[in-house]
Image: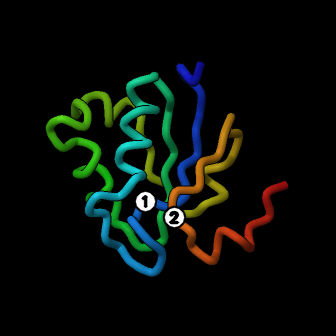
């Protein structure tokens, strides 16, 4: 179970080198994990915090209070991953290949 576990989500855009989130698989993955009670820490180098919150708060995706309780948007990938129980890479940003995962 992922209930109350910290899950790092790296990448929210639908593809690298863009801030476009339309039909991004990250939205659906995040919704599933939130429905299971996971605490999400999301980082994407180009997608604005407001866009991520908007996408996750969209009717049919999740409730506003669920997003405010379970989602944290971080300013760097290491912050998202710190003490995470799991890591999900949703967008193939080149920078994610160069991270020190230790």
What residue is disc 1 on?
12
Residue 88: % across, % down = 59, 48
In the rendered image, residue 74, in percent from the top left (x then y), is placed at 50, 55
Q: Residue furthest left?
A: 59
- In this rendering, the answer to whether 64 lies above or below 77 is above
What residue is shown with label 2? 91
| Residue for point 45% across, 23% down | 36
Residue 6 drawn at (x, y percent): 59, 34
Q: Is residue 2 above or below residue 90?
A: above
The secondary structure type at the circle numbered 1 is: loop
Quadrant the C terminus occupies: bottom right
Instruction: Name the quarter where the N terminus is drawn.
Output: top right
> Image check: 20 left or right of 25?
left
Q: Tell me how many marks there are.
A: 2
Q: Nearer the viewer, residue 101 or 68?
A: 101
Q: Are marks 2 and 1 in contact (CB under 8 Å)?
A: yes
Q: Between residues 55 and 48, which one lies in front from this camera angle?
A: 55
Figure check: 49 above or below 71: below
Is disc 1 surrounded by few (<14), some (14 to 19) or many (20+) residues within 10 Å?
A: many
Which residue sits at x=43%, y=42%? 29
Secondary structure of residue under mark 2: loop
For this rendering, which residue is in front, 93 or 65?
93
Q: Tell me which residue sits at (40%, 53%) in the image.
A: 25
Q: Which mark is residue 71?
A: none
């Amino acid at each position: 179970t992922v209930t109350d576990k910290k899950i790092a989500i790296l990448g929210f855009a639908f593809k690298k080198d863009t801030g476009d989130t339309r039909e991004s698989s990250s939205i659906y993955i995040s919704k599933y994990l939130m429905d299971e009670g996971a605490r999400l820490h999301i980082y994407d180098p180009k997608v604005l915090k407001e866009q991520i919150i908007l996408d996750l708060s969209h009717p049919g995706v999740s409730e506003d209070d669920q997003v405010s309780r379970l989602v944290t948007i971080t300013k760097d990938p290491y912050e998202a991953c710190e003490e995470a129980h799991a890591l999900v890479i949703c967008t193939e940003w080149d920078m994610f290949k160069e991270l020190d995962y230790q």
